[in-house]
Amino acid sequence: MVFSSTTLRRTVATSVVTVTLAFGPLLSAIAQTISLSGAGATFPEPLYQRYFAEFQKKNPGIQVNYQGIGSGGGIKQMTAGTVDFAASDTAMTDKEAAEVERGVVFVPTAGGPVAAVYNLPGVSQSLKLSQEVLPAIFAGQITRWNDPKIAADNPGVNLPDRPIRLAVRADSSGTTFIFTNALSAMDPYFKGRVGADKAPRWPGRPLSAKGNPGVAQTVKRTPFTIGYVEASFANENQLQTALVENEKGAYVAPTIENANRALENVEFDPDFRVDFEKLGAPADGYPITGLTWMMVYKQYPDAAKADAVKKLVQYSLTEGQALNDDLTYTEIPDEVAQQVIQAVNSTVTTGGSASR
Amino acid sequence: MKEPLETARSPSRAGISLFHPSPEAELNITTTSRWDLWLEQGFTWLLCGFALSTVVLLFWISWVIYQQARPAIQEYGLGFLWSQDWDVAGLAFGALPYIYGTLVSSAIALLIAVPVGLAVAIVTSENFLPLAVRSPLGFLVELIAAIPSVIIGLWGLFVLIPVLRPVQQVLYDYFKWTPLFSTEPFGPGLLTAGVILAIMILPTMAAISREVLLAVPQELRSASMSLGATRWETIFSLLLPAGVSGILGAAMLALGRALGETMAVTMVIGNSPYISASLLDAGYTIPALLANEFPEALEGLHIGALMYLALILFAITLLVNIAAVLLVWLIGLQRGMVLNR
Amino acid sequence: MTATPADSNPEVLAAELKRPLPKGRVLFSTGMSAIAFGLTGLALLPLLAILIEILRQGVPHLKWEVFVSLPAPAGMENTANGFANAILGTLIMVGIASVISIPIGVMTGIFLSELGQGAGGSSPLKAIASAIRFIATILSGVPSIIAGVFAYGVIVLATKQFSAVAGGVALAVLMLPIVTLTTEEALKLVPTSQRLASAALGANRLQTIFRIVVTSALSGITTGVLLAVARAAGETAPLLFTALFSQNWPQGLFNPTPSLSVLIYNYAFSPFVEQNQIAWTASLVLVGLVLLISILSRLVTRRNLMR
């Protein structure tokens, strides 16, 4: 009995110490920092993590937290009001935007190529995939690696006699939209069978994984798969990357230069969204190139948050842009960036009680 | 107890009168004071209230899920159970591939974990090894239960899949004529998920079976051995039949854990919503689907379909648990009748 | 007892006793032993493989800085990289879950063991208790992801924030049945004679329960609580859409909160090598934490047995 009560006392003492340890720094941290929480696309996640780390160094009073949960997730959480800002590679459709009670402003932040990546042991040179072959693979018309159509574009490559496994996104994804949008522009059959969507119905029993990181890992670890990821994920994972035929008939790699060339003629709407059909069929450069948007509310519950968001947008579109190139993203043209900053500064307000 | 009882906040009359005897105080040990009675009643209700919160919680969870599932239940009814379509863009949803994947991967896990778990339980409960060896051995196996599932998934992805791939290739090369191994292997899939789940439920299976075997009285073993049975004959004709209800209970508990496992499975099953007879093919389970699609499901019908699946998963685990309780009860009943005869 | 022929002839008896077992039975025994030991080895293999892998990948990057710094953004070199915030977040959420689930669980366990069975309980209480025991068993089988869905629906949507509280509630749902059922088991082990002795000395039921029964079973209860804490600390699925994650220090209980398990899940798939390394190091820390708790609970029980 003596022992037991000692245990009891010890248990209590330990828990008190633990709780103090756990909550001590917390209480001091709560003090007066403003914290912004965001979630959404995984496509620009490495870029945003970098932006926000630098931003916090310059603005010690503001903490920004961003989690890549997929573009669809970003749109959902924006609508549910559980975040302060979100990100999506498809911006939002008019219908989606209408459901955000606090209103939404679109902030284009970067662009980038989506690479077609594959895992073929024993094949060292980059595969060339034509505007006919690539959609046919993802529409389930070409099902084996040694298909004559693939072989015709790749003379001398020793293609294995193996089935092609698609590796796609398990979550609703902007990268998927960019990819299927471009493939739909290349091939009417693909457009009818799969179509441009964040979460289409793929043929041929694909493997799926969450986020760009998940697909990249799946392709990296599973021989005879083919998938698609934002180019920086392909580079960092050292995945085999296909050269894709563009409008001009050249086989091009998913590089920043080629992506910039593809985005040269993109025209932004007044609300800074774009015409996705045009985006999916660039006249030159890398044919599968997309843009990504940050989405902020028009109304915030308090002035401090609204100010913090304005500062964040300002930073992302000025100093932040300088980081894009480092991480293989394209930059937003200067004049567009200035217009966006102005639009955000004038429309984001402290609108009463918000949606609560 | 070191301290006398009177220091308790609720003084007992009997105690007081014992220690302070005075002429007018009666020593009353037959009735409890009203105060005590109230206290006890109040306490009983308090505890009862706490206990009922468990019930409230279960119904609350069911209600929250049912509320969100309603759009899909109204739209699809029971047809949801055997529809195979899952098209988020086209808003067409069916549950069968997920139910199939959940059941098949758990079945594989059970098929592996039951014999292995029993072997561990036998080795660590009988006197094959000195006590100093078999006790830590049992502890080691139980340690697996302490490893977070996301880490087991990580290990599965980086270590197990490369190890299993050649095994799968052999299975395919020699057994492709059976439907079970009829597709070309690529690593992740139902079989891999089954193996990962087997590893995860092994400690449950082993630990409970061990307890069950240890509970069989030592005299029975001695009796069996003195009649000339070998150790294994004793195990098969005495220990296992004696412990069968407990072992079945362990298997059911393990099955329950396998059905609900999320992270490790989604990392190795391939997440492919199709039904394939081949165990080498990819599959999808209900928890994995929830983890992947719930955070971004936007349309009411999509959320509804996911919650409908959650409800189905809930119902399956409920059935397994009820089956476990019933089995244990039935076998106990039978045993009792045998003994009474 | 009537003498059998063997009894009457000691030599025949001795020969009978010394006759080796038939080959078939010997073979069966050895064969089964070999299979049993083989399967036990097979069971230990994954555990050892997992532990070795975690040590091999985790130890090289286990530096002091991982315990004190925040996760560095990808691609930034020469920045201290760590997961101090995730450790703190895990502690906070497990703490919240404990504060909710331990009192309720222990009280429910006491109810089940002390009022719901044995000679003391009246029959309606008994019926309630067996119903509650069944429901607690069902609750212990609730998949962790469903606990997350529940907490998202009840807390996140109501407060419009991913938060430590939502994560804590999800974990509490998972801990509650474990605490309840293990508390009941621990209390059941206390001999009835102790309860009777206490009652005979004039203690009322309240005193008996708290000063005699609970005190003797304290180590058993602690074991159950520690097991529940270990389970909660390792959970990922219910935190994915309740607590979310954060690159920063936890900002109060109603903000997105990082945790070790979600950090591991995020970083395991990351394209950046340094984040993969951090994932393994975090695994090492998390496994270390959880194993420590498990072993602690073992020790508590063992002391109890030796007493």
Image (cartoon, grey):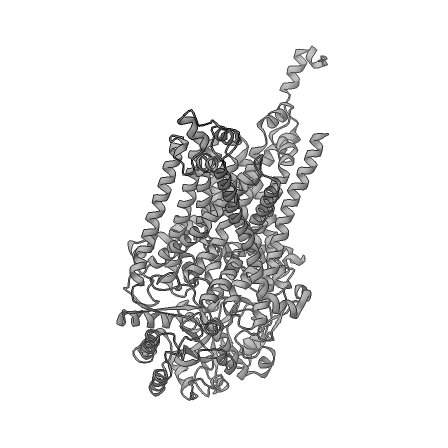
Tell whether B60 sits left or right of C100: right
**Nearer the observer, A201 or C185:** C185
Q: Left or right: where does residue A83 sit relative to residue B318?
A: left
Q: Where is residue A138 in the image (x, y as percent from the top left)?
A: 56, 75
Residue C307 visible, this orientation? no
State the quadrant of the C terminus of chain C: top left
Q: Is residue B145 left or right of residue C248?
A: right
Image mark count: 0
B16 above or below A21?
above
Q: Nearer the viewer, residue A183 or A291?
A: A291
Q: In this view, does C69 lie to the left or right of C165?
A: left
User: In the depicted view, which residue is nearer to us: A88 or A97?
Assistant: A97
| Outermost residue, front side | B24
Task: State the image quarter where residue A163 is shown.
Answer: bottom right
- Is residue C150 shown above or below B126? below
Residue C123: image quadrant is top right
Q: Is residue A295 above or below residue B79?
A: below
Quarter location, residue C124: top right
| Residue C190: x %, y % from top left | 50, 33
Q: Position of residue A37 (x, y in %)?
A: 39, 69
Quarter containing the N terminus of chain C:
top right
C225 or A54: nearer the eye? C225
Camera sees residue C276? yes
- Residue B130: percent from left, percent from top: 48, 30
